[in-house]
Structures are given as C-alpha cells and as structure tokens.
Image (cartoon, rainbow, N blue to C red):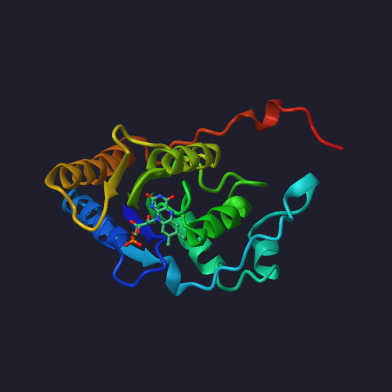
C-alpha cells in the first residue's frame, strides 16, 4: 500500500511539509509505504482547457500540452492508493501550485476514471481565515474525481506552531486513511457511464 503526501507550498521550509510528515509517519506506522512530494520541485504548466466542450483530455494528450513536468506525477497518482493533499491557504483557496496540479488532474478523470476509489486526506495551513472554504473546494473537486474520504479526513492548522490537538487529529487522519484503503482496495465506484445518454 502506498500513500503520498503532496506539499503545495512554494516555501522550502513549509509548515505544510511538517504537517504532512506527521500524517505520513502515522500511515507508515500502520504499514503503508509513504513519501512526501513537493510540488515546487515540479514544473507544472497551467492546464490549457482541452477538456472543454468535448475536447480530448487524457494523459497522452496532456503530455503534448506542455505536460512534461506534470505527467510523471500524474502517472504516480495512478499507481498510489492514497494521497494527502497539503497546501497553505492562499486567498481562501489552495495555493496556485496545488490548483495547477488539480486542473491538470482532469486528464485522469475526463475520459477514464483513473482515480476512482483512491483515498484522500486534506491538510491546510493558514494564518487568518479561509481554511474551511479551501477545504470545501478540494472536497468537492476530489470527490468528483472519484476519491474516497475516511472519517475525520481533513485538518487545518493556524500559524507556524503545531498544537498537540492538531497533531493528534493529523495522526488520526493518517491512520484512518490506511484503514479505509484496507477496507476498500480493489473496489470500483464509477458505474453510470453505460446508463448515460451518449454524446454525438
Ligand atoms: C499569496 C498568499 C495568500 C494568502 N492568503 C491567505 C488567506 O486567504 N488566508 C489565510 O489565513 N492566510 C493566507 N496566507 C497566509 C498563508 O496561508 C500562511 O502563511 C501559510 O500558513 C504558510 O504555510 P506554509 O509554511 O506551508 O507555506 C496567504 C499567503 C500568501 C503568500
């Protein structure tokens, strides 16, 4: 079982990385292979919108659209069982780095549901406000992409210090992700395609 944590902070010593490390530590203790991935190490160009109005949007097409920087990470997402998305709150939403990745993940769900049944967790770091709006935004998006969420699957931390309550919550999230993966591995959830009206 493999779970990766994705840090969407552009900062080298990000609080987000510290928070993700705690969650991954707990997942590892439960038996998962884990790794922390930093988005700032990838050259992720913005999505070019190929999916709009029935355009082709798949991994192969994405690679052609300045996708060299992001496709290796997208291929990794197909292989892993769980992903913890971590980001600072930037203007009531995820960071631009994280948003760019999310947009480019469209090619993993548009023609085929390649993320179906993977388990996700969310961690945000913030200073003033907007964490719950940012979390809500990613919940909607990732659920639409086919991700499953364990109970207590999100945590947000305020400022540079990590208080023991937040830390306990993050550990619980890491542990519950492993439990949900064990319970649902190999299960698929997307089945309506055969029942949808066919396009032109
Ligand atoms: C461009 C930008 C936008 C931000 N917007 C918000 C915001 O809307 N709400 C908030 O609470 N903090 C905001 N912040 C503060 C960051 O969320 C905060 O510094 C963050 O916790 C840093 O986490 P990191 O160490 O993981 O990068 C913003 C910071 C930047 C640079």
The quadrant in which residue 199 appears is: top right
Q: How many numbered discs?
A: 0
Q: Is residue 27 above or below residue 69?
A: above
Seen from the viewer's position, the closer of residues 104 and 17 is: 17
User: Taking 97 as reference, is 177 left or right?
Assistant: left
**In the image as oriented, which residue stretches furthest toward the right?**
200
- Write the residue at 18% across / 48% down: 30
Q: Is residue 11 above or below residue 188?
A: below
**In the image as oriented, which residue stretches furthest toward the top?**
195
Figure quarter occupied by ligand 1: bottom left
User: Taking 133 as reference, is 20 left or right?
Assistant: left
- Write the residue at 37% across / 69% down: 11
Q: In the rendered image, is residue 14 in sight?
A: yes
- Write the residue at 59% across / 57% down: 104
- Write the residue at 52% across / 59% down: 96
The quadrant in which residue 8 appears is: bottom left
Q: Residue 97, how many percent across, how many down?
A: 50, 62
Q: Is residue 182 above or below residue 96?
A: above
Seen from the viewer's position, the closer of residues 27 and 194 is: 27
Quarter that holds the C terminus: top right
């Amino acid at each position: 079982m493999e779970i990766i944590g994705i840090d969407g902070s552009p900062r080298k010593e990000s609080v987000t990385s510290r928070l993700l490390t705690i969650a991954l530590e707990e997942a590892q203790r439960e038996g998962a292979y884990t790794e922390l991935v930093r988005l700032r190490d990838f050259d992720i160009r913005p999505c070019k919108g190929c999916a709009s109005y029935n355009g082709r949007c798949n991994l192969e097409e994405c690679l052609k659209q300045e996708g060299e920087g992001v496709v290796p990470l997208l291929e990794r997402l197909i292989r892993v069982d769980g992903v913890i998305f971590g980001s600072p709150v930037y203007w009531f939403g995820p960071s631009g780095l994280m948003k760019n990745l999310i947009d480019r993940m469209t090619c993993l769900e548009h023609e085929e549901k390649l993320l179906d049944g993977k388990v996700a967790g969310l961690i945000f770091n913030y200073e003033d406000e907007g964490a719950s709006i940012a979390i809500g935004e990613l919940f909607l998006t990732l659920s639409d992409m086919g991700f499953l969420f364990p109970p207590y699957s999100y945590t947000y931390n305020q400022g540079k210090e990590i208080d023991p309550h937040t830390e306990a919550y993050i550990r619980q999230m890491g542990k519950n992700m492993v439990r949900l993966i064990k319970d649902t591995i190999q299960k698929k959830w997307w089945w309506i395609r055969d029942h949808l009206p066919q396009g032109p």
